[in-house]
């Protein structure tokens, strides 16, 4: 038992998420059981407003859970200090970065924040991590560009590189494919798959690109009104989970193509 | 960062300009003193008694005050612009100068209400300094209490502006009931002045200034992380509440003492960080902080030299000069570069 536990990066037990407002808590989803192994690419999908963001916010300790436990490396999330958590988990958020005047190198270098000294000087180990992150994401040529000169797709790669430079076992991305064209959506998700293979990190992302996620992910977390199911994409398809993802009046899931079709 | 070295030349040039401006500022005034004489007075070999008196008791403390005021306001402006992610923020957005104004207004304008006997007692140099410090300190305290409760940094910005409105309203009520002489005195304080500090006052000013500066230097790493936005900064392990507290405290100490000793100096705090960013083209606070220090000191020295109207007997209000010189510079920089760096 202890042996298999070593590879579990993130685990939830009987997790309930939602908002505590005044006396009555608003439960968004309950009884969530997730187990993410080392070296897995996991896609989190669900309809708008189902609670994907709330789940990610809870897993990243931005908001408190209502019930249940979250473990990272077999240690309770609530027992982590913010510095320890910064060394175990890095994020790519949907919000734009505050200053676009940073150069790509400076932005990626900020990922080293948890490791640098009081004034933020970079040592050789930091430089190594930064250069590795830049080369893994293929953005070495952009190094000296300012962020306001980049396209949305390039900026997303830079933000992923920053998360890589933070040198954590777990990377969580909140909708990394929004605002991107079809090619770059596939490019970013394919890049995530490559990173998982090459670095053996665990990457969890939320996305609306269900058909792409089905093709690329090792595991998917599907949030529906009733439950939260985690399984390999092919098992989820054979169980018919995707049919209950959206109301069936407009689009239906096609088992054979693994994608949604508009009803004629 | 590796690019740091490319800035070395600019820094050497700026330090050189600062030294020239410093001596020029001491030399210029209603009585022109040649540079050689200024040098001589520093090494103690000047045998011109009135010159040496002017330099040691008036011009030297004024030049040092100008350096402290310019650099201090510039740096507190930089801290506020980064903390609030707002290019319009300056050292006084938290209501510090309005707090100081309120304190001074209560002493100068309110002295009429306390009766004629107190009036002469109250309006001494120190009472104005103490009132300004107390006023800005109270506003700062209110802002800090609020900032520990409010999660959103933008809310603090609004609250600071509200404090400003409240104090401005009280000041107008007070001035409505005041005599013309009192109003004039209050308005004169509002013009700002660098030249009224004795060595003792300068010493106290310097101690508080150094403390504020130290806190600013300790905030460099946090400030750089805040460039990503608060949520990213948090995910990098930055304690937002603590950094925010330290940054606000540093600003308040710097801007608060400067306002107390030199009056509400306009514009410098807002403009210097922009001028620096245009010239250095970076957001890295490790570069910006010393650069803002140098630019602030240089521009304040130049403004003060102009305000003295060399060889004439008049002295213009420093507050008018900072805006007259500074605003066109910022406009020129923005028009020339066609983009705002922030």
Image (cartoon, coloured by chain):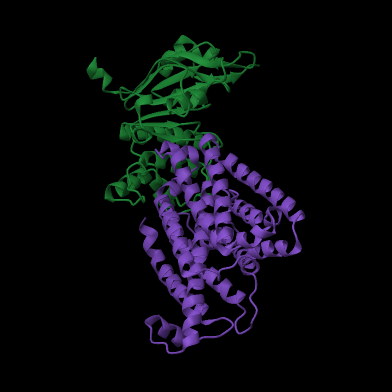
Chain colours: A green, B purple
Judge by depth and name the residue closer to the eye, B314 or B232: B314
Label count reads: 0
Give the answer, above or below, for where B44 lies relative to A123. Answer: below
Residue A204 as seen in the image, left or right of residue A132 = right
Q: Specify whether residue A82 is in view.
A: yes
- Residue B285: x, y in percent? 44, 54
Give the answer, above or below, for where B159 lies relative to B103. Answer: above
Residue B296 as seen in the image, left or right of residue B114 = left
- Residue B190: x, y in percent? 65, 62
Judge by depth and name the residue closer to the eye, B193 or A60: B193
Residue at point 51%, 15% (across, down):
A29
Residue at point 38%, 23% (across, down):
A218
Judge by depth and name the residue closer to the eye, A204 or A109: A109
Quarter occupied by residue A70: top left
Q: Specify whether residue B264 is in view.
A: no
- Residue A109: x, y in percent? 38, 47
Give the answer, above or below, for where B254 lies relative to A259. Answer: below
- Residue A33: x, y in percent? 41, 15
Quarter holding the N terminus of chain B is bottom left
Outermost front residue:
B117
Quarter occupied by residue A179: top right
Residue at point 59%, 58% (across, down):
B339
Outermost bottom residue:
B47
């Amino acid at each position: 038992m202890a042996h298999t536990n070593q590879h579990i990066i993130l685990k939830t037990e009987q997790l309930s998420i939602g908002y505590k407002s005044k006396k009555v808590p608003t439960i968004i989803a309950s009884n969530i059981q997730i187990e993410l192994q080392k070296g897995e690419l996991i896609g989190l999908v669900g309809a708008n407003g189902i609670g994907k963001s709330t789940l990610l916010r809870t897993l990243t300790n931005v908001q408190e859970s209502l019930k249940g436990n979250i473990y990272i490396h077999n240690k309770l999330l609530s027992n982590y200090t913010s510095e320890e958590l910064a060394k175990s988990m890095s994020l790519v958020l949907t919000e734009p970065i505050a200053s676009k005047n940073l150069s790509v190198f400076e932005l990626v270098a900020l990922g080293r924040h948890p490791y640098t000294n009081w004034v933020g000087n970079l040592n050789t180990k930091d430089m190594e991590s930064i250069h590795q992150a830049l080369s893994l994401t293929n953005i070495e040529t952009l190094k000296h560009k300012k962020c306001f000169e980049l396209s949305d797709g390039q900026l997303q790669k830079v933000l992923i590189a920053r998360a890589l430079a933070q040198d954590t076992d777990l990377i969580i991305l909140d909708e990394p494919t929004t605002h991107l064209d079809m090619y770059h959506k596939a490019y970013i998700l394919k890049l995530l798959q490559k990173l998982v293979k090459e670095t053996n990190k665990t990457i969890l992302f939320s996305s609306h690109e269900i058909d792409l996620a089905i093709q690329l992910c090792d595991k998917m977390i599907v949030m529906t009104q009733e439950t939260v199911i985690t399984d390999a994409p092919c098992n989820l398809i054979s169980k018919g989970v995707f049919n209950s993802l959206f109301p069936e009046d407009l689009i239906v899931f096609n088992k054979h193509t693994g994608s949604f079709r508009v009803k004629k | 960062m590796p690019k740091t070295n490319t800035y070395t030349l600019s820094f050497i040039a700026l330090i050189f300009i600062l030294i020239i401006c410093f001596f020029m500022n001491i030399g210029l005034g209603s009585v022109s003193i040649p540079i050689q004489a200024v040098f001589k007075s520093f090494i103690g070999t000047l045998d011109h008694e009135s010159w040496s008196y002017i330099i040691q008791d008036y011009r030297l403390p004024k030049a040092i005050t100008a350096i402290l005021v310019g650099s201090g306001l510039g740096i507190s402006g930089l801290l506020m612009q980064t903390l609030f992610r707002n290019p319009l923020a300056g050292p006084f957005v938290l209501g510090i100068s309005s707090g100081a104004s309120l304190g001074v207004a209560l002493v100068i304008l309110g002295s009429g209400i306390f009766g004629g006997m107190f009036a002469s007692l109250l309006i001494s140099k120190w009472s104005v300094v103490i009132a300004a410090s107390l006023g800005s300190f109270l506003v700062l305290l209110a802002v800090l209490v609020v900032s520990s409760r409010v999660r959103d940094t933008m809310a603090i910005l609004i609250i600071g502006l509200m404090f400003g409105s409240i104090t401005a309203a009280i000041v107008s009520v007070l001035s409505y009931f005041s005599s013309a002489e009192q109003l004039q005195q209050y308005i004169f304080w509002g013009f700002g002045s660098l030249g009224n500090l004795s060595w003792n006052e300068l010493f106290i000013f310097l101690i508080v200034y150094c403390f504020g500066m130290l806190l600013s230097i300790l905030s460099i790493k946090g400030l750089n992380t805040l460039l990503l936005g608060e949520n990213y900064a948090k995910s990098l392990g930055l304690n937002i509440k603590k950094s925010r507290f330290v940054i606000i405290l540093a600003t308040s100490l710097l801007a608060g003492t400067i306002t107390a000793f030199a009056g509400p100096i306009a514009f410098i705090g807002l403009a210097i960080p922009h001028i620096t960013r245009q010239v250095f083209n970076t957001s890295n606070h490790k570069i910006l902080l010393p650069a803002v220090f140098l630019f602030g000191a240089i521009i304040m020295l130049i403004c003060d030299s102009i305000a003295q109207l060399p060889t004439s007997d008049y002295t213009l209000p420093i507050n008018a000069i900072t805006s007259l010189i500074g605003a066109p510079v910022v406009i020129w920089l923005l028009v020339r570069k066609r983009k705002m760096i922030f």
